[in-house]
Image (tube, rainbow, N blue to C red):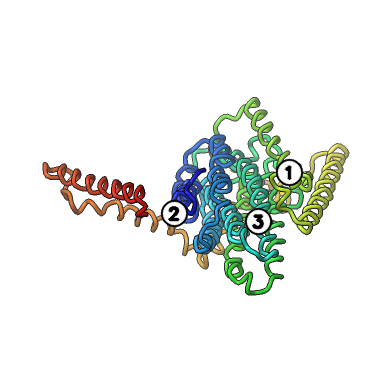
Amino acid sequence: MILPDGDNVGIILLLVGLLIKSGFSGFHLWIPKVNEGGPSHALGAFAGVLEVFPLLLFYRYVLPNQLDPIIYQVLFPLAALGIFFGGITSFFHKDPKISLAYSSVESINFLWLCLIIAGMFQFSVDSELMNLSNSFRILFFLSLFHHSFSKTFQLFSIGMVARLKNSSSSDELKGIGRLLGISPLLLGAGTFSYAVLPGTLGFVSEATYFYLNARILDMPIGRSVFLLPSMIFIFFGIVLGGFTHIKLFMSLFLSTPGKDINIQPFGAQKRRWVSISLFSLALVIFIFPLVLPYFVRLPMLSPFVDPQLVDWFWTLSIVSYITIGAVFIFRLYDHYQLKRYGIPKTKNWDCGGGYSGHELSIPSSVFSEPLRNSLGRYFLNKTGESKVDSFLIKGITLFFRLGTGLISKTNHPKDEDVSKYLAISSMFLIFIFSLLILGDFGGL
């Protein structure tokens, strides 16, 4: 992108557009609306590619420029609040697809947080701050992979299950995933990643973030004082965002479904293609941590990796090898036990005493209801809608209705309303032309 030397107006306007397009904190209102009614495969592609494309544009065109530090100082707490708000709202929302939408808000703001910290210190003369900036560049790409593949998996699996029954309540969808005929171990790959289990993409991303926060805490207080107050909001949002996926997985895929539940047809051919799609995404989620030390050697990443970070990635990779190997061994042992003794009688995680009735199975609201009165009621109203979003929508609506005072108060337009509309349009047109003329003559 070519701009005159010292002219950052175009960069700032591009930054604003990218913030809006990506669903940054305060500009996220459209993301839940998109997830509310879209098909699962389209939403998966949207989360994997289109949501992260504005962040890649920021990395390519905005980050290399030396912006005023105040811009990053304003964006940093907003991103932290976006993580906090997205995690809390996703945890307490009862619609599984809307919960995943607010989980995307949390993930997107986390990606912005990485880029903001990278941009904040990239031109610092302090070597520690420069290394911190480079490390958060690496974390951005790791988290980008985590969001793209893990969130695509979740939207594809949970979104598909939610469409099998015409319901927007996760409690009414309890146990419906067991009717698909697909292994819960495969359906849980995305949840395992968001639960930060070793051997997954989410483990690599979140563990690296905690490691970098430990390095921040080791820095002198004068260098890290700006980052420390926001950590509690960030940690809280990340934890609740992860529990959102855990509660949905346990309720939708592990609980016992009701006997009178009716779902749309799900034939063998559809089951086969869904299994292939989920398996291909699961492979990336589990294989990426194993090749992590080689991934950071790519030409675009290797200049930003310091020796401490390389050692850390080798540690994560070794832990992932051990974890995946142990799970594989236990799986082989379980297969051997099944062949030798047959299928055990008790197959349910939430029904004790060998009873297999759906009455004792646990809905997803059991996880969130104990915290609703102390925390959730401040963010969601009684109908389940976000109070923050409702406030923002109301403010935007009032802003766009400012001109209604100049026209007719009734639904039937009058003759003089046309002239008023033309007058308003003319004033804005003159204002735009004035900006262009001042820009040409160096006035701006």
Residue under circle 2? 385
* Residue at mark 2 to residue at mark 3: CA–CA distance: 34 Å
Near mark 1 (Cα within 10 A), the count class, few <14, some 14-19 or many ≥20, is few
Q: Amino acid at mark 3?
A: Phe
Q: Position of residue 427 (x, y in %)?
A: 23, 49
Distance from Cα at disc 2 to Cα at disc 1: 44 Å
Tag 2, which secondary structure?
loop
Which residue is label 3 attached to? 136
Q: Amino acid at mark 2?
A: Glu
Residue at 60% x, 59% y: name it: 117
Mark seen at residue 298: 1
Q: Is residue 146 left or right of residue 100?
A: right
Please tell me which residue lies in front, 188 or 408: 408
Residue 33 appears at what percent x and percent y?
Answer: 45, 45
Q: Earlier in the sequence, mark 2 or mark 3?
A: 3
The residues tagged by marks 1 and 3 sit, at their Cα atoms, a distance apart of: 16 Å
Q: Above or below — where is 173 with respect to 86?
A: above
Give the class, few, some or many, for how many residues have Cα within 10 Å of label 3's Cα (few <14, many ≥20). Answer: many
Name the disc covering residue 404, or none. Answer: none
